[in-house]
Amino acid sequence: GQNIDQPTEMTATEGAIVQINCTYQTSGFNGLFWYQQHAGEAPTFLSYNVLDGLEEKGRFSSFLSRSKGYSYLLLKELQMKDSASYLCAVSPNSGGYQKVTFGIGTKLQVIP
Amino acid sequence: GAGVSQSPSNKVTEKGKDVELRCDPISGHTALYWYRQSLGQGLEFLIYFQGNSAPDKSGLPSDRFSAERTGGSVSTLTIQRTQQEDSAVYLCASSLATANTEAFFGQGTRLTVV
């Protein structure tokens, strides 16, 4: 089975840096996704990590440690528009039947 | 179409009625997911289709819920005898067969049972 944990809510200040953590326990593991979901909208893809380490994409970076079952999403130079939910999702390694499992999401509020 | 299309975008129905929600995935995407999201909550997995394999129905909350996918493309989620607790946004997503590809979400159907 799959179990994904992430904080339900976080608050951070405009211009600051925030780290959103995600831990997972899965019966198999292929990679880990991060999605962003603004209120009332559909989730959109941010990143996908397969190998250990940090991948940077502009103001957003995502880190993965396969041995620790741990990932984080790092948001720098926070802007008000970054207020959204951030969903961690795991892609298992189960042959041809690879259902992605989503965490409950972390609701980030950016304040002035 | 260019993206995942869901219809209707909004549906208000009376308690006890049946509803059908439709999802048109991106052409060529063999994987299709249905999720439910209640107000302010996370994504709740409902059902997963992958090619011609038997669907994973493990997330369906009761036997009032069913889904089918015809011809490996369009999918319909049916809720029979709707209850007020079924009120939520129902999201459909599709992706290519391989697991390391992103899922693309539709805009969802907001279902309100009154």
Image (spheres, helix red, strand yellow):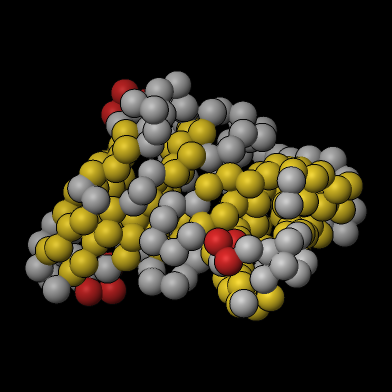
Q: Position of residue A52 (x, y in %)?
A: 88, 45
Relative to A98, say whether A24 is above or below: below
Relative to B56, say whether A14 is above or below: below
Counting the numbered discs, the total is: 0
Residue A83 at least partly seen: yes
Q: Position of residue A104 (x, y in %)?
A: 56, 66
Left or right of A28 on screen, residue B63 = left
Residue occupying the point 54% across, 28% down = B96
> Which residue is nearer to you in this view: A99 or A72?
A72
Q: Where is residue A61 in the image (x, y as percent from the top left)?
A: 77, 51
Q: Locate the C terminus of chain A and report the quarter of the image it occupies.
A: bottom right
Residue occupying the point 24% across, 61% down = B111
Q: Which image quadrant is residue A99 in?
A: top right
Left or right of B60 on screen, residue A4 = right
Residue A27 at least partly seen: no
> Which residue is nearer to you in this view: B81 or B97?
B97
Q: Locate the N terminus of chain A and report the quarter of the image it occupies.
A: bottom right
Residue occupying the point 28% across, 67% down = B86
Q: Position of residue B3 (x, y in %)?
A: 40, 33
Q: Which image quadrant is residue B26 in?
A: top left
> Which residue is nearer to you in this view: B101 or A82?
A82
